[in-house]
Amino acid sequence: MHISLARSVICLIIVLLPALLTTNAIGDNTKQQPVVLSLPAETVLTSIQKLLPLEVPSQSRQLQGDITVESVERLVIHDNIITVHGVLFGRNLVATTNFGGQDIQLRLGEVRLPMICDLQTRFDAVRKKLLLTPHFRQTAHIADESQDPLTPLINALSAREYVVDLDALEAIDLKVGAQSILLVMEPINISTLNDTLVFHLLPRVSKAQ
């Protein structure tokens, strides 16, 4: 799944552009220091809320249907984990379960599920991608997995890696006076610290062709 969390970083990059242009000469081959951008949990939460409802690709053998993140009320960042409190909404859901060696389809219809989800973050330095793996905490709605019909919904979304869209950082074509500047921000690391999502970005500045 591609999530455009990185869009909120663009405004910060543009604000920093004058400093980048003065410290990194165009065509300079000297070793550059990364730009560190820190996004507090409140900023990440606001960015996600602006994207809602957010479609979740969840088609699997266990579950078919349309699933969206309907709301997010709280977000906490800690130990490379983003904990999200919100509501999932499912429409036209059909779950497949196995009973006595036979596959049985269970039509759930529409479902709203309050959830607490821990998103384990991992930065793939080779692919330059941020990966999120959701793990849902046990709540009253899923306390008894053997009887709760929502279990297939949770299982279909859990323990899968989702890719965060960082393409918005890759290239920005800006006009500075009469000159066209191509600013590329290459992510070299993404981490968490003190309820903050920290981006380490290597700026590449060149004249646009």
Image: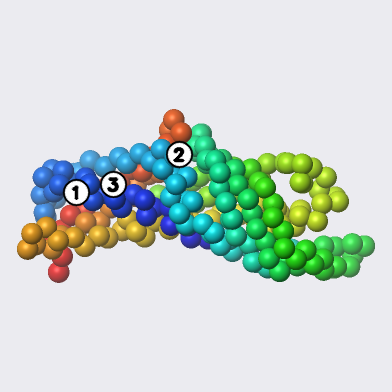
| Circle 1 residue | 17
Question: What residue is pinned by disc 3?
Answer: 12
Quarter of the image for the C terminus: give it.
bottom left
Gap in angstroms between the C-alphas marked 1 and 3: 9 Å
Q: Which mark is residue 31?
A: none
Question: Looking at the image, which is closer to me, 205 or 15?
Answer: 15
> Mark 1 or mark 3, which has the lower sequence index?
3
- Is residue 133 shown to the viewer in this render? no
Q: Residue at x 82, y 62 (%)?
A: 97
Residue at (64, 66) in percent of width and height? 66
Q: Please give left or right for residue 164 compared with residue 36 in the image.
A: right
Identify residue type, mark 2: Ala
Label 2, residues with CA under 10 Å away: few <14, some 14-19, many ≥20: many
Secondary structure, mark 1, is helix
In the rendered image, residue 20, in percent from the top left (x then y), is placed at 17, 46
Residue type at mark 3 is Leu
Residue 45 seen = yes
In the image, what residue occupies the spot 80% across and 56% down? 149
User: Which quadrant would residue 200 be assigned to in this image?
Assistant: top left
Q: Residue 34 in the image: x percent, y percent?
A: 26, 42
What is the quadrant of residue 136 in the picture? top right
Calculate the distance from the C-alpha at mark 3 to the C-alpha at mark 2.
15 Å
Residue type highlighted by circle 1: Leu
Is residue 85 depicted above or below 164 in this figure?
above
**Whole-percent x and y of residue 15?**
22, 47
What residue would you read off at disc 2? Answer: 41
- For label 2, the SS is helix
Coordinates of residue 25 in the picture (x, y in percent):
10, 49
Helix or strand or loop: what does disc 3 sit on? helix
The answer to whether the residue labelled 1 contacts the one labelled 2, judged by CB atoms less than 8 Å apart, is: no
Q: Horizontally, is 18 left or right of 38 in the view? A: left
